[in-house]
Amino acid sequence: MSTDSKMNKTIDSEHHDHPSPAKYFKVAITLVIITAIEVGVFYIEDLKWGIIPVLVVLSGLKFGLVAMFYMHLKYDSKLFSSLFFAGVVLASCVCIALMALFKYFA
Amino acid sequence: MDNTSVMENQTENAHETTTGLNNRKLLMWLFLGSDCMFFGSLIATYLVHQGKSLVGPYPVDVFDIPTTSVSTFVLLMSSMSMVLAYSALNRGNLKGFRIWILSTAIMGATFLAFQVFEFRTFVHHDHLTPQVNLFGSTFFTLTGIHGAHVTLGVIWLLSLYFNSFRGGVTPERSLDVDLAALYWHFVDMVWIIIFTVVYLFGVFRGF
């Protein structure tokens, strides 16, 4: 691919409009609602160990919303997403490996 | 200046790179990826030592979930104001940029105030220090380093705010704000994880 066409491709991808302020506000409301649900679920003692996947999913949702919309990963180059999520995946694997090593799950 | 021409301007600076992307932005994402590893190791250290303290106080004795929920809310709102600051700058609205970035810095400082209040309560009221037990050591290390990140972020935001009065922040140079915004959102994301893993899991009575 020539430099000109590569630059044009980059310009085209950069032309994707970022969200409007109204969208940012909606994302913020969603984040607040999810946080409220997390705190609400926290007080349901009958969930027992079932709270772990619930909170992990809710936190993951918040994480994804901030990454995609506030950090603009949804609209930017996929290379940025790759760099960031490579770190996230590595960190998660290190975390799980360390926990397994110290018999956290036993 | 509209959003399209700002993007074109940023891309013009990127045309000399092999990726077609701005090197500074690429470096910031690399840094954030590496910082994930840093916090991942700290969170893992906290988790593997959880429940292994020989003496108290323990998480259930000290954590105040309602108060921490409020500080979490403040930090989430600061992320919104940060992205609104960047959006305002891209639309050429310098006054709007100043309002939103100052709001972000104030909310960041409010979050830090909550942290300081919490730490002081733990130390003076609950007698929890890093030296007392494994919980104290891992908790203060993890949240203290996160707090240091937030502090650096607040200083960065305030520098951008004051620099805007000297003509140092313009829509053409919105990448400077974009980089600060990425850092700020990352700090917020780390807190999302810490709040769930440390606070909510730490004192859940159903276990």
Image: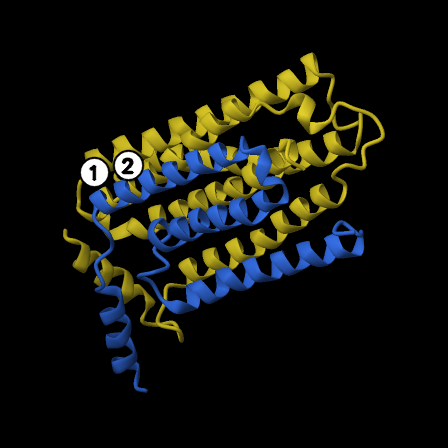
Residue at 46% across / 55% down in the picture? B28
Type of colouring: by chain
In this view of the protein, which residue sits in the foreground, B134 or B5? Answer: B134
Q: Chain under label 2?
A: B
Left or right of B149? Residue B102 is left
Q: Residues within 10 Å of mark 2 (few under 14, many from 20)?
A: some
Direction bottom: furthest residue: A1
Left or right of B69? Residue B4 is left
Task: Tell me residue B41's x, y (percent).
Answer: 67, 50
Question: Which of the labelled discs sits on residue B164, or is there none?
Answer: 2
Question: Which of the labelled discs sits on residue B94, or is there none?
Answer: 1
Residue at 25% across / 37% down in the picture? B97
**Chain A shown in which color?**
blue
Q: Chain under label 1?
A: B
Quarter of the image for the N terminus of chain A: give it.
bottom left
The chain assigned the colour yellow in the figure is: B
- Element marked by disc 2: helix
Three-letter code, disc 1: Leu
